[in-house]
Image (spheres, rainbow, N blue to C red):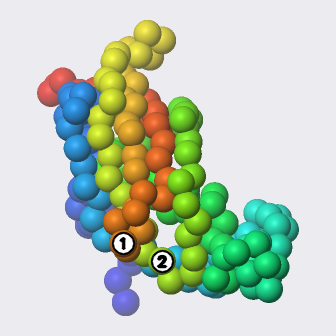
Amino acid sequence: MTEFDPSSFTLLAKGRVLEEFQPGVRFQHHWGRTLKDADNTLFSAATLAHNPLYFNAEYARSLGHPGVVVNPYLVLCTVVGLSVEDLSEAGGPFLGVDDLTFHRAVYPDDTMTAGSTVVSVRESESRPGFGIVTWHTEGHNQRGELVVELNRSNLIAKRRSAP
């Protein structure tokens, strides 16, 4: 058996640099994600979200829902997660979410898709070599209905000059 040599694997650069973002550019994030009852139960338990709406079908039906409701923060995390490959996979600190709106409930077996539009790009005043990008991200269900929307920002590295 040969010894493991991690240098034998080629590292591929992932993500985008600051110069690749321009206001108005739209990204339709691929894949989508079907949220299952087990996802909802595990996420709600792990985050101590003990709202019976997320795990008690009879309670949810008493409030007019067809069954349990998917924890909206799982919906948020899923939509943001769908956007990472196109927007922030290269790294850089996540700076936060603004203007978060949940438009409608999501139920187990709903499939979320997401798209983002660049809202603004600016150089960082405190971190040379970096900038701040803000995107408006929308999450839709399988019927194309808007479920959640938000603005999110990340610190993104500029393209490094060749040595």
Picture quarter containing residue 105? bottom right
Horizontal placement of 51 versus 22: left or right?
right
Q: How many numbered marks does the figure carry? A: 2
- Quickly name the residue at label 1: 143
Horizontal placement of 135 versus 30: left or right?
right
Picture quarter containing residue 62? bottom right
- Quickly name the residue at label 2: 110
Q: Is residue 20 above or below residue 83?
A: above
Hey, which residue is sitting farthest top in the picture?
A: 125
SS under mark 2: loop
Horizontal placement of 144 versus 108: left or right?
left
Residue at the image point whose x is 40% and y is 46% from the top: 137
Q: Nearer the viewer, residue 36 or 94?
A: 36
Residue at the image point whose x is 57% and y is 76% from the top: 107
Discs 2, 1 touching: Cβ within 8 Å: no
Q: Amino acid at mark 2?
A: Asp
Q: Amino acid at mark 1?
A: Arg
Hey, which residue is sitting farthest bottom in the picture?
A: 1
**Image quarter (top left, top right, bottom left or bottom right) of the C terminus:** top left
Measured from the top left, where is residue 20 in percent x and y? Answer: 20, 34
Q: Is residue 162 above or below residue 30?
A: above
- In front: label 2 or label 1: 1
Residue at the image point whose x is 55% and y is 45% from the top: 101
Does residue 85 appear in this view? no
**Image quarter (top left, top right, bottom left or bottom right) of the N terminus:** bottom left
Does residue 9 appear in this view? yes
